[in-house]
Amino acid sequence: MFDSVSVIGSGRVGSAVAARLRERGVDVGPDGGLVVICVPDDTIAEVAAGLDIGPWVAHVSGATSLTALEPHRRRFSLHPLQTFTRTRGPEQLDGAWGAVTAESEEARAAGRWLAETLGLRPFELDDAARPLYHAGAAIASNYLVTLHEVASDLFRAAGAPPEALVPLMQRTIENGFELTGPIERGDWETVEAHRRAIRAARPDLEPLYDVLAEATAR
């Protein structure tokens, strides 16, 4: 659909996007028929406003509305539902899903083209639903980091190696998030023992444990 694409931004996402486009034989450089904005959310509108009207314009933010791409009308967004690091390359895109938000069938086609070219599995997302969608993504990715840190702190306090948690977390994902453990068994005595131990070692973490236990029980 596009022989040339301009990528603005060379951060973790922008560098992976540009590298993947080059791998797929797409010319990446100035004056592309599609301009993909890969900059922090709070600068998308400023960058978009400075672009010439004409080419298609897209951003890769998960939370930002299409209105940030004003005054452009040939526009869409594609959010790669993945976490990125600079230590890896375009293979980070492989197999991930991509949220396409568009206002016309032509824009949806452009978004699907970009998603599939990058190796993503596209799905449509309404612009108004983006904050809720992004909250779910943040819980799944960002808060997983938080949970690992909290669990690691408890392991250290118990004299256990925190690195032992990684295979457990990985297997939980591989098992399709099937719930096991004391709450699944209805073993509330063990849950209460958890609370007492956390209260003694890390009382600041007890409220977090309570909230997670209540959510898990539901």
Image: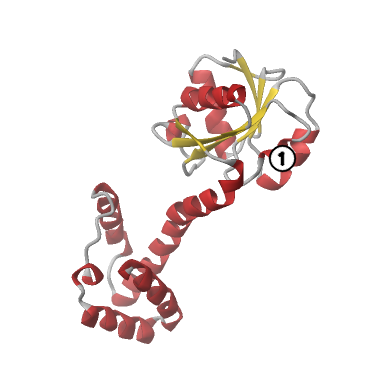
Instruction: Please indicate whether residue 176 sits to the left or right of residue 23 in the image.
Output: left
Instruction: Please indicate whether residue 202 sits to the left or right of residue 171 in the image.
Output: right
Residue drawn 49% across and 17% down? 24
Q: Is residue 149 above or below residue 103?
A: below
Front in this rendered view, residue 144 or 100: 100
Looking at the picture, how far across and down is residue 63, in whole percent? Answer: 60, 47
Looking at the picture, how far across and down is residue 102, in whole percent? Answer: 60, 32
Q: Is residue 2 above or below residue 94?
A: above
Residue drawn 49% across and 19% down? 23
Front in this rendered view, residue 77 or 164: 77
- Mark 1 — residue? 67
Residue drawn 56% across and 39% down? 12
- Name which residue type carries label 1: Thr
In which image quadrant can residue 158 be found?
A: bottom left
Residue drawn 31% across and 70% down? 217
Looking at the picture, how far across and down is residue 32, in whole percent? Answer: 67, 18
Image quarter hosting the N terminus: top right
For the image, the number of numbered tags is 1
Image quarter hosting the C terminus: bottom left
